[in-house]
Amino acid sequence: MAIASRRKMLAGAGLLALATVVIAQDETYGFMPDGGRTILVQVLGDETLSQVASTEQSEEAWQAWGITRAPDLNPAELETLAGYAALNFPLTPDRIAQLSDSGDAALLPQDGRDLAIAQCQFCHSMFTGYLMHDRDETGWKGTFKAPFHQEIPMTETERDTFARYSAINMPLRVEDVPPELRF
């Protein structure tokens, strides 16, 4: 099997694996806006994940990139994508090599939605502790100053990614949250 064919097959398998994770999250948290990684995979176009993940650009340049690939993105989706990419790319050469070999989108850093789902609900409800808060990016970053939030196992980039996503996408409207998750 040719290397290019193998890479395409592995890339497809990686996207399928990410889709499986997203579908599982969407069953419970499908009401939450997509995060930057998910939006990136949806608008990727002809470029590979490793090409995109090796690019360093400003948030404004990432917005322009997103507009050319998916002009139908709404402003919050575009801002979410651009914020995620500007904060998380370029990846390290080792991670880019892994992406080149596998094409597995799960190798990309978690986005703000992923981080919120993974970290917030262990100590308090997503509804009252996260989904209904209206904060700017500085306000969201400030939550990590509380002693009980300082211990959350997240890097500074992950905290920035979470704060950027949350500032753009929170609060949600009460009626957008399923009744069973309103507590």
Image: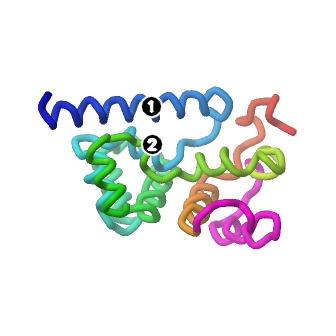
**Image-based side of 96 in relation to 114, left or right:** left
Residue 104: image quadrant is top left
The image quadrant of residue 117 is: top right
Frontmost residue, 20 versus 41: 20
Q: Which residues are magenta?
A: 131-155
> Label 1 sits on what residue type?
Ala
The residue singled out by tag 2 in the image is 106
Nearest the eye: 177 or 121 = 121
Q: Residue 113: horizontal and vertical position, in percent? A: 59, 47
Disc number for residue 92: none
Identify residue type, mark 2: Ala
Residue located 81% across and 30% down the image? 179
Q: Which residue is mark 1?
A: 17
Secondary structure under the numbered disc 2 in the rendered image:
helix
User: Mark 1 falls on what kind of element?
Assistant: helix
- Residue at the image position 26 percent from the left and 47 percent from the top: 100
